[in-house]
Image (cartoon, coloured by chain):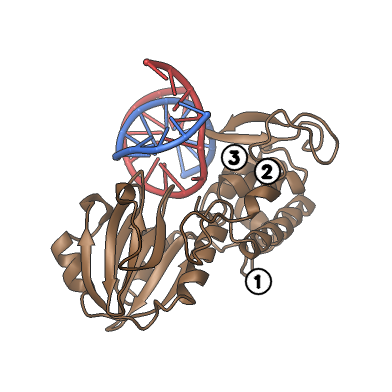
Chain colours: A brown, B red, C blue
DNA sequence: CAGCGTGTTGAGGA
DNA sequence: TTCCTCAACACGCT
């Protein structure tokens, strides 16, 4: 479930895995659809013999910096997963989509049951001009992300506050699960128009966004694997969700039943009593 | 069999 | 121009 904490967890794990400084010696592509600005031939040629220098995150994008000023930009969308594994390790072939073979008998494997992920290749700095990345806003972990910033972005908007904070051009990195959690902690009804919020509300959203995302990163995200060794070990944060998926359960704050509605087509959970 | 979904884009319409 | 809903992407799960 890649939202910001899951993507950060993956990057932290990969950056500490032994993947860095390895040379890509082969690339196998099983789903061509994932390549958005290249053909398999061009993609492979672009990556072959380059070393992976480091990986950074922008919003929910992973940016792989390679030798010769090359970058690989990956978005996991709904189901994408990246695992650094030994070549010999058992592979559940069903959802294996791309393999990057390295010169140390390891392989970076991309799994994606729904094949929604995206892979773009760019020369260094060109990726910053790429359409999808230029649109990104500040993410909640940046120090300049404040209630004031949020207010300047959306205080004139008639959109539901949940819709506004899911829009990556307003805030980058918040997804459906964390949006519900953040609005619950901020005691704001997800359907309220952004224009009706006070500066205090925006301050709360900024405060809890930082708090909850940091906490989730600390616990390894929600359902993303921990990447230590096996792909089945899941993140621990899902156990700490307060409202998301809690339909019919008592609110941890007031005991009222959590209800589920749709906002902008997305399943939305909230407490009707706490979130006015 | 129908409905849902962690993300995003684009079409069509009010 | 703004903002909403719906569909699409492709598949697994309930």
> Mark 3–mark 1 contact, CB under 8 Å?
no
Mark with earlier residue (2, 1): 1
Q: Residue at x 52, y 71 (%)?
A: A12
In terms of depth relative to the viewer, which is nearer, A31 or A141?
A31
Q: Kindly indicate the quadrant of the structure image that contains residue A71.
A: bottom left
Chain of residue at mark 1: A
> In this rendering, would A151 be left or right of A11?
right
Q: CA distance from mark 2 to mark 1?
A: 24 Å
Number of callouts: 3
Residue A255: percent from left, percent from top: 84, 33
Mark with earlier residue (3, 1): 1
> Mark 3–mark 2 contact, CB under 8 Å?
no
Q: Quadrant of the C terminus of chain A?
A: top right
Circles 2 and 1 on the same subunit:
yes
Crowding near pointer 2: few (<14 within 10 Å), some, many (20+)?
some
Query: What residue would you read off at disc 1?
Result: A143
Residue B12: percent from left, percent from top: 34, 27
> In this rendering, would A36 be left or right of A251?
left
> Dot 1: what SS?
loop
Q: Residue at x 64, y 54 (%)?
A: A237
In terms of depth relative to the viewer, which is nearer, A135 or A18?
A18
Which numbered tag is attached to residue A159?
3
Query: What residue would you read off at disc 2?
Result: A195
């Amino acid at each position: 479930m890649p939202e910001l904490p899951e993507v950060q967890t993956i990057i932290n794990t990969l950056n500490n895995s032994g993947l860095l400084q390895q040379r890509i010696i082969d690339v196998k592509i099983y789903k061509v659809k994932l390549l958005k600005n290249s053909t398999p031939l061009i993609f492979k040629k672009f990556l072959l013999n380059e070393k992976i220098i480091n990986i950074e995150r922008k919003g929910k994008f992973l940016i792989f910096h390679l030798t010769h000023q090359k970058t690989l930009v990956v978005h996991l969308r709904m189901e994408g997963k990246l695992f650094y594994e030994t070549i010999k390790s058992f592979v559940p072939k069903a959802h294996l989509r791309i393999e990057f073979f390295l010169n140390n008998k390891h392989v970076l494997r991309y799994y994606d049951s729904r094949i929604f992920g995206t892979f773009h290749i760019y020369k260094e700095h060109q990726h910053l001009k790429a359409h999808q990345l230029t649109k990104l806003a500040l993410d909640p972990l940046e120090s300049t992300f404040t209630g004031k910033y949020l207010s300047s972005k959306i205080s004139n908007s008639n959109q539901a506050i949940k819709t506004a904070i899911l829009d990556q051009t307003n805030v980058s990195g918040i997804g459906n699960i964390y949006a519900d959690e953040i609005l619950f902690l901020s005691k704001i009804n997800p359907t309220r128009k952004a224009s009706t919020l006070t500066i205090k509300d925006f301050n709360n959203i900024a405060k809890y966004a930082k708090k909850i995302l940091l906490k989730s990163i600390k616990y390894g995200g929600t359902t993303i694997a921990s990447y230590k060794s096996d792909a089945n070990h899941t993140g621990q944060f899902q156990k700490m969700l307060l409202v998301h998926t809690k339909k019919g359960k008592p609110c941890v704050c007031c005991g009222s039943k959590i209800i589920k509605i749709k906002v902008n087509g997305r399943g939305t959970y909230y407490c009707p009593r706490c979130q006015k």
